[in-house]
Amino acid sequence: MTVNVLFAATEERWSEYRAPLTEAFAEHGLDVNLSTEMPPEEVDYIVYAPNSAVQDFTPYSRCKAVLNLWAGVETIVGNTTLTQPLARMVDPSLTQGMVEWVTGHVLRHHLNIDFFLARQNGKWERHVPPVAAERPVTVLGLGELGTACAKALAGLGFPVTGWSRRAKDVPGLTTRYGAGGLEAALASAEILVLLLPDTPQTVNLIDAGALATLPEGAMIVNPGRGPLIDDDALLAALDRGHVAHATLDVFRVEPLPHEHPFWSHPRVTVTPHIASETRANTASRVIAENVRRGEAGEPFLHLVDRDQGY
């Protein structure tokens, strides 16, 4: 039987995903009618990007699941018309890309590479960094991405503390959880990596109080979500030197406005939301597997917990 799959995303995404999705559905033995347009009452699955024109899911009465193209679901999870199962994207290439970006910037800060880049002036200024075992790192968020990054950093010899809202046991890490564990996790973080979702509970989690808890000279790496950080509090902490540097890939408003002080601050590195990008080839296989599962009556992968918001 033919399965009707609506691709609800931008035209750019359609040109990127059409061939990989078609190939992935065929590899999974699925007979799929994949299109950007079809009557709502005939749609079996929606491959979805939250910036698409589809915002009212009520007409999609036959739809078995909405399969998000992105890892983040904060802009869709609160949509009251979305009553179908919602699956977030867990793409192995996205995870690998995040691990590489986080590891690269943690090592950049650890080795003080910026110091040497700024001093190509003919002066022989020796600055020997500590070894990884002497540089505590804290990762806030132990989901798929946070756990992968924390394990990679621990594998390089960093003592890694991982924090999550609920108790988790990850071999090789010191794990803390809940409000009581957050202060301890921050207090040891010479480098702080933020990989939490954007939920009402995490907005401004890194405020003036949290920043003051960090060790003097701590460095922050945020590839998670922009609203995790109170921008004004971070700028104040940077200005007084309590935070030595912040490398930021995500922001409250994207693209980051030209006039935002992050652009010109000497202790801020801005990257344009490139830490984790869904790759069409591998993401298409994840989507095809979920459609196969839906047709076989098996549980969907990576379902979003509506109460938790991710």
Image (cartoon, helix red, strand yellow):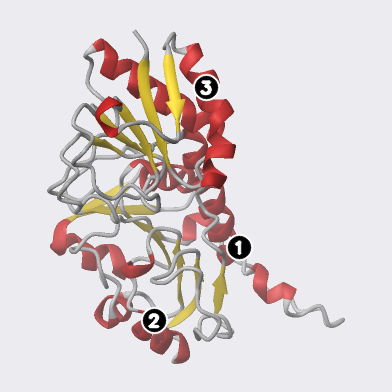
Q: Residue furthest front?
A: 39
Q: Nearer the viewer, mark 3 or mark 1?
A: 3
Q: Amino acid at mark 3?
A: Thr
Q: Using the numbered discs, state the Cα–Cα distance from disc 2 to disc 1 in whole angstroms.
A: 20 Å
Q: Which residue is mark 1?
A: 108
Q: Which residue is mark 3?
A: 22
Q: Which residue is mark 2?
A: 234
Q: Using the numbered discs, state the Cα–Cα distance from disc 3 to disc 1 in whole angstroms.
A: 40 Å
Residue 198: numbered disc: none
**Image-based side of 269 in relation to 52, left or right:** right
Q: Position of residue 160 (x, y in %)?
A: 38, 52
Q: Amino acid at mark 1?
A: Arg
Q: Report if the CB atoms under discs 3 and 1 are less than 8 Å apart.
A: no
Q: Amino acid at mark 2?
A: Leu
Residue drawn at point x = 43 percent, y = 69 percent: 251
For the residue labelled by badge 2, is the local secondary structure a helix, a strand or a loop?
helix
For the residue labelled by badge 1, is the local secondary structure a helix, a strand or a loop?
helix
Q: Nearer the viewer, mark 3 or mark 2?
A: 3
Quadrant that contains the N terminus? top left
Q: Position of residue 120 (x, y in %)?
A: 81, 78
